Image (cartoon, grey):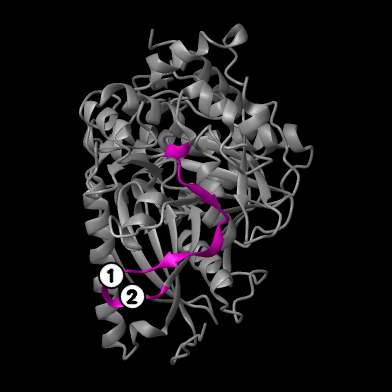
Amino acid sequence: MTIAKGQYGPLVGAIDEGTSSTRFMVFSAATSKLIASHQAPIKQIYPKEGWVEQDPMQIMEAIRECISKTMEKLREMNIEPSDIAAIGVTNQRETVIMWDKLTGQPLHNAIVWLDMRTVSLLDELLEKIPNKNKNYFTPLCGLPLSPYFSATKIRWLLDNEPSIQLALSEGRCCVGTVDTWIIWNLTGGANGGVLVTDVTNASRTLLMNLLTLKWDPLLCKFFDIPMNLMPKICSSSEIYGLMAEGDLTGIPISGCVGDQHAALLGQSCLKEGQAKSTYGTGCFLLYNTGHNKVDSHHGLVTTIAYQLGKTKPVYALEGSVAVAGAAFNWLKDNVNIIEDVTEIENLADRVLHTGDVYFVPAFSGLYAPYWQADARGIICGITEDTQRGHIIRASMEAVCFQVRDILEAMHKDCGIPLTKLQVDGGMTCNNLLMQLQADLVGIPVVRPQMAETTALGAAMAAGNAAGVDVWDLEQTQGNADFFYPVILEEDRDNRYYKWKMAVKRSFGWDT
């Protein structure tokens, strides 16, 4: 295809659909510079305690708004939409949507990745497994049985929504993660939309075989999910279809990567042994293990890092933290300790330490490396001298300690300690948090000055497939800020020991 080259050279767009907002961003492939963008919020719905949903139609409305507004900004800069050579999609993972392929209407709200409604269903499934072993299927799919992943959400929808049962019996039912929903809609929807997912998103469902990169018959049978219901699995970088609407009609959608995997690409962690940590609603660490599928024995999950076209897939170990930035929102919305999350750094900096307070924000259980669905949040070490600054600072250290938990597990699984931790995500603008992270893990923390690494990774995947040959995937992403540890190892280890004590006290609360 002919690649247009305007004043910034070839441009690549990226849809970044997250848990709390949607963005459309346009990058210059020649410089990786962000040219224009627009952001719109996504509302979360809480029907019951522990249930988290979103309106799939609102997701598409937000995406269309973001694209339209970004096109307006480009035109104000005398840039035509035709200069955009390709579009990538990156998305919140594990979230499940079911819809009617004839009408294009959702059959239920999206069930979001952190939803916990399937805990009792998981207990029933574990009864079918020898010794109720949550890791029984990890050799196939790399994941423990958990409400976190998509398969239990799909099974719940099939069991509990009559409209879905009817649509399934009449052959009208479609199911997919958020990437599938987006691509299907933008390539035509009910009028010929393409039903696909990529290997990174599929590797988060509990249904894909990590070696064959196909839906696994044994796994689909265990969850009683018809294999013909599932979308086609593709690589992370190929032309899936063409935009069928708006200013970008005819432009290929050629990149599809789960958000954490996209950040790995955007951070240029393309070599075995490199790792990044993304700080958002949750916190996610990915460690590139190359073409080798490394099975974790210390509570991590094995996942596909990315696959660029017909090349061999690259694997990763991942550790997921359910509550990172969400803890700050809790301080604001639920207990009113702060008025705005932007206050956190200033308020925490007014105290020199946490006053020996430890906060475990296990609001809906703990993910890696504990996988304790019955854990609940606790605050330990409160005395009459405890101030709100101590609790705020303890919430920041909780993020850092959870990252250390995962890095310790990665070291045990791979045998090679990291020499630096590359970071991205909205929370990384907090300098105190980054310094605490360096102090509590004992290695330098590296923050790129180009912060939009998730969207950039999706754009890189899209440009790679669309023939944007000026984009060097091996390039480094410009300047970075470094945070070096400044506390003694003894202090670091003592604080981590008390953190582990607090974590143990959080187990077993939800009986």
**Is residue 316 or residue 88 the one in the foreground?**
88
As drawn, the label of residue 350 is none
Asked if residue 459 is positioned above or below residue 152 in the image, the reply reads below
Whether the magenta-drawn stretch holds residue 210 is answered as: no
> Percent x, y for residue 136?
63, 19
For residue 329, say whether it is visible.
yes
For residue 448, say whether it is visible.
no
Q: Which residues are magenta?
A: 228-251
> Residue 114 is drawn in which quadrant?
top left
Residue under label 2: 248
Tell me the element at label 2.
Answer: helix
> Percent x, y for residue 93?
44, 44
> Percent x, y for residue 2?
51, 86
Residue sticking out furthest to the front: 170
> Percent x, y for residue 506?
45, 16
Whether the magenta-drawn stretch holds residue 235 is answered as: yes
Residue occupying the point 40% across, 16% down? 121
> Residue 281 is drawn in which quadrant?
top left
CB of mark 2 within 8 Å of CB of mark 1?
yes
User: Residues under labels 2 and 1: Cα distance?
Assistant: 7 Å
Amino acid type, label 1: Glu
**Is residue 108 or residue 438 the one in the foreground?**
108
Residue under label 1: 245
